[in-house]
Image (cartoon, grey):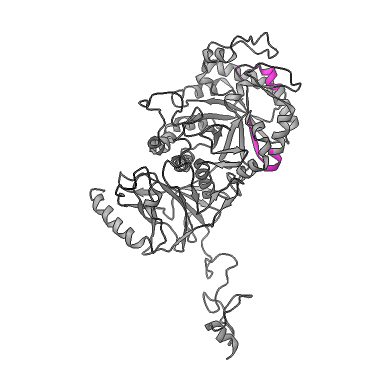
Amino acid sequence: MWAHAPLLACVACLAWLLAGCAHGGPAGPSTAGTASASAAPLPAAAARVAVAANAPMTAMPPSFLGLSTEYWALPLWSSHMPLLERVLSLVRVRGDGPLVLRIGGDSADHAFWDPNRAPGPLWAFEIAPRWLAQARALVREDHARLILDLNLITDTPAQAAQWAAAAESALPRGSVIAFEVGNEPDIYSRADWAAITAARSLVASRLAGPRLPAAITPHDYALDFLAYAAALRRIAPHVTLAGPALADPVSHARWLPALLRATHGRLGLVTIHRYPYTGCAQGSRSPDYATIARILSTAASTGMAAALRRDVDVAHDAGLPLRMTELNSVNCGGRPGVSDSFATALWAPDALFALARAGVDGVNIHVRAAAVNAPFALTPAGLAPRPLLYGLILFVRALGPHPRLVSVSASHPRSLNLGAWAVRVGTRTLHLVLIDKSRRPARVLLHVPADGPLTVRRLLAPSIDAQTGVTLAGQSLGADGRWHGGAVAQTIVPRHGAYAVDIARQSAALLSVRVTPGALGTPPAAAGKSARAPGTRVAPGALGAPPAAAGKSARAPGTRVAPGSAAHAAGSGR
């Protein structure tokens, strides 16, 4: 159907140039990609996005978006706790469930409960009562829920149970929603751990953990999981047990069926991790090597999500939810110039919506306190927001109370990398997120079941590799964690039953509109009643309202009428 795409693109470009200013749209070249300023900008591509009035919808799970971090991050953040709480409020969906914070990751297999603060080996992280006090303050202030990762490699089930008991006792009741057994056992390497622990004997040390296993197979992990489950049942029988926190759920998909068969109903939450690309030392010719172009590719978002459908189906067939307790664009702490670029702000909402559509029940973005792939850093100067944080906030703003993911149809030339997502929020609000990850702008003809004004808020940056200068709806985050600058929103009215929306190249936009009654599962308008919003005053004589008495104006109570206006003259009796 796109045999005439070049002609359509030229027509769209001309229309865009003529209509862009009238609509208050962005100047595409000002949000430039990686092309030089002297390069001629590519013409706008025509695209069509549609949401049918009876489009299928899927309820998004509550607390879908959360964060993940390491045990050692909390002490580093403790001196910035009010600022951290402000950041967490930015990624918490209003009207949704509590924010889920998963603590563990690589540090989990280094972590030990140590109430007496006895000296330990350098590779170990000792969890002390002060750590629990910091966690308790965070949970109380933000009403967060915790997934605590347990040490599987250098600890024992009995010692892990002691840590679980201390956490259950010190933290607010019900705040620990799961204990996750281990971290990425599918890529465990005895050689790596032997290097970490060096010549220190685990058995001879105060940390009398087991000897390092030669390898961990699905069967080995299942046996370990059951041992931890038995120890934890006596401590916290009501808390869900999670696992196996696979590093590579695609290549190691056989782990899940084997674990489900062997754990006899003890597993309550299936957990996996995913990083589309790597920041570890590899040659640039590796297909896993992280670049901006690869972060922007569909392989990093919709392709990644599609590859996980088998794992989702295995979990759901067993009656269990599947949560991705670690997600980021690049692993190993990220790659400078890629993981901290504006490309991640466009990647994040696209990937999160794709994972929700694939059936994933929740996602925790991994935040290593000192890593370049973290969405933010807390420094002595305050908050250092990275582009990824803006992408997460855009995703959060697209959600709300009882969000339902709505099916969208889209058509556009292959040269346009356009993501289109829709969410119905509340009773009549429709949010759409349009993400243009290509080097050409898009002129989108939008068909939705609405006839009122549509509001557009844009996510922009100076370039695709920009690390600063990002704005969302015209505002940027300051070192104080607050929004600075005036909020900017564009209003578009429909013409001939459609909305014409310009999307600058390598940018995103959040669109909001009220759907017509009866569309997308909303209640139809009652007979004889209008579909106006509650509290809206109807002009006398309109929509069946009684006419105004002679000599009285139709203005709302308390409205001041400007002298000399028509309403003022009518009401004055002059």
Image height of 228 relative to 416, above or below: above
Depth order, front residue of 31/260: 31
Depth order, front residue of 212/440: 440
Residue 340 in sight: yes
Where residue 485 sits, quadrant-wise, is bottom right
Residue 157 in magenta? Answer: yes
Residue 284 in magenta? Answer: no
**Residues shaded magenta:** 138-161
The C terminus, quarter of image: bottom right
Q: Is residue 289 left or right of residue 217?
A: left
Where residue 251 sits, quadrant-wise, is top left
Residue 435 in sight: no
Q: Percent x, y for residue 249? A: 47, 26
Q: Percent x, y for residue 83? A: 64, 43
Depth order, front residue of 32/349: 32
Residue furthest to the bottom in view is 574
Depth order, front residue of 147/55: 147
Q: Percent x, y for residue 53? A: 43, 56
Q: Percent x, y for residue 495? A: 38, 64
Number of numbered callouts drawn? 0
